[in-house]
Image (cartoon, coloured by chain):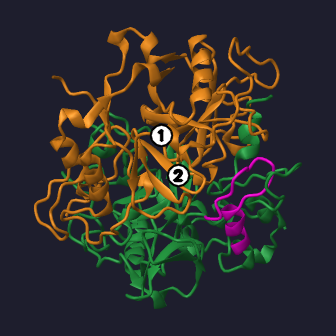
Chain colours: A green, B orange
Amino acid sequence: MSPTRFLRTCTYALPLAAFTVLTATAADLPAKPSAGDLVKQSKPADWRPLDPNNTLYMELPSGRVVIELAPDFAPRSIANLKTLVGEKYFDGLAVLRSQDNYVAQWGDPDAETKPKPLGTAKAKVTAEFTVPMSNDKHFVRQMDFDGYAPQIGHSNGFPVGRDPKTKTTWLAHCYGMVGIGRDNDTDSGNGAELYVVNGHAPRHLDRNVTVIGRVVSGMALLATQPRGGEAMGFYGANEARTPIKSVRLAADVPEAERSNLEVMRSEAPIYKQVIEAQRNRGGPWNKFSPNYVELCNAPIPVRERPAL
Amino acid sequence: MSPTRFLRTCTYALPLAAFTVLTATAADLPAKPSAGDLVKQSKPADWRPLDPNNTLYMELPSGRVVIELAPDFAPRSIANLKTLVGEKYFDGLAVLRSQDNYVAQWGDPDAETKPKPLGTAKAKVTAEFTVPMSNDKHFVRQMDFDGYAPQIGHSNGFPVGRDPKTKTTWLAHCYGMVGIGRDNDTDSGNGAELYVVNGHAPRHLDRNVTVIGRVVSGMALLATQPRGGEAMGFYGANEARTPIKSVRLAADVPEAERSNLEVMRSEAPIYKQVIEAQRNRGGPWNKFSPNYVELCNAPIPVRERPAL
């Protein structure tokens, strides 16, 4: 008996940017490809590189956080955020909050006393909690039940809810998703304060906040922040905040310094197999299979682009 | 516009052991008590203290992790774990693994080369992936749909799935839940290697592992561990592992050194109100209400016992 072997064989969750392969030697449930196997079997055409014009690099002292933007779902908000980023608004700001099993949040530590000017960016942007379904030309439906949305699926790799009655669609608050802080006023957000989900998906925030994208690399740098000691995980005056060195649009960074990531195409047939591999996991470790997977337990694979 | 006020008002997620109150000044959705309000309004009889005979203290250099055991759901495994703890098996062992958005795991770093003797504890314990429904005399059903279990609810505050057809019940892998590592063999776990969920609930592990309880305090100490650099978040030879100073049964710790926590009674009427407060959140910040809450988004409140 070797206790450490347990989770060396039993771990099938898909982390945001790393895959592991199950070696099936004997089967309780039938042998079948795991999500990791499918990634290994995939073809170059199953992947797309990140678009440098819709990718942000947030540089922390501990490394780079890569955020993929979803302009189909928040065109106005993302335009304003790009203005802020282009004018280097975030450089020198900080992570303001880390609440366990909820969100980490970053922005201007002096927002309430001596706020940093927003430059040419707008102070208020009309909310984009949902957008017309016609905005989203890439939706691929996942047939599992969801309590928070009449329909679920992925669009360009982003987890999505939608409602055919209202003909609206929206990004779902899964782990690693990034949204725009706002006050009680629906239109009070502008992108100067952002948060990321660092725990179990707080899906009740869906349709209540403008979501702009997701962290595709470096999420651990935000997830392992010490939790803040004040209410809701805000850092107190005597707690060290992590400074933000800079936030840049990938297109504004020299090519040699860009991250070289690619995202599985959620419209490729292989992604349906990835979902199915998580609905029913095979291999010798699994004894019971739920024949179901939650939207937020089926994140789209991301990886370093293999050398050609 | 004060950006930092956003999540000062919008945060209603229930962290494991801390509550915040929404000050409703104007309502978009009708004003109604939040989960935090309900905690404030609760009566002493709505709470029960932790049972020192079913509470573990894991002492890390950064502080104490408190684990409440659920003997209704894993009597054999918990008996073996108590033997290990009573013989100080865990003292000097380490956190072996931290995988982002999945689990942290602890046990014997030398398990594969020069394993620490298990003392009088058993090396194999018959699995308790599910137990007969008759074991669980405290189940209170939550009527929301769940994709991983025919029925869901809470039992003594633990999130539970059950199946009336097979007349079985089991603990659900929500954030903070603690399970027993095992190899491919169903009965290969013994409690010497434990893991805790540190991200979105990996509910596909339900009915595949013996779950023994949940972290009710100190979860952030495990969640913020640096992620391990090897496959599945195991720490490599050159990475610093967090040592475990000791693990003790609370009953074996002098009363003055015990944590003074209490857990809301899931069978108390107020807990149904707490769930409802999360199914439909009121107050001025919320614009949309899902009329639904996932099992793992409705954790039972835990708090320091108020002074009498």
- Relative side of B196 to A244, left or right: right
Label 2 belongs to which residue? B162
Residue A212, quarter of the rendered image: bottom left
The percent position of residue B68, horizontal first and vertical second, equals 45, 30
Residue B16 coordinates in the image, percent (x, y): 38, 40
Left or right relative to B87: residue A186: left
> Looking at the picture, how far across and down is residue A93, in whole percent?
37, 51
Q: Label 1 amino acid?
A: Asp
Q: Residue furthest top?
A: B254
Q: Which residue is mark 1?
A: B136
Quarter of the image with the C terminus of chain A in it = bottom right
Residue at the image point whose x is 42% and y is 81% from the top: A75
Residue neighbourhood size for the residue with mark 2, other residues' Cα within 10 Å, grouped as few (<14), some (14–19), many (≥20): many
Q: Is residue B88 left or right of residue B285?
A: right
- The residue under the point 34% across, 52% down is B13
Q: Secondary structure at mark 2?
A: strand
Q: Element under label 1?
A: loop
Label 2 marks a residue whose chain is B
- Is B79 on the left-hand or right-hand side of A169? right
Residues indicated by labels 1 and 2 sit on the same polypeptide chain: yes
Magenta highlight: main SS: loop
Q: Is residue B237 above or below residue A219?
A: above
- Of B176 and A285, which appears nearest the observer? A285
In the displayed orientation, state which residue is furthest to the bottom. A134
Residue A88 in sight here: no
Mark closest to the chain's N terminus, 1 or 2 = 1
Q: State whether residue A15 appears in this view.
A: yes
* Residue range of the region highlighted in magenta in the rendering: A272-292
Say if the magenta span includes residue A26.
no
Q: Nearer the viewer, residue A136 or A56?
A: A136
Looking at the picture, which amino acid does disc 2 mark? Arg
Chain letter of mark 1 equals: B
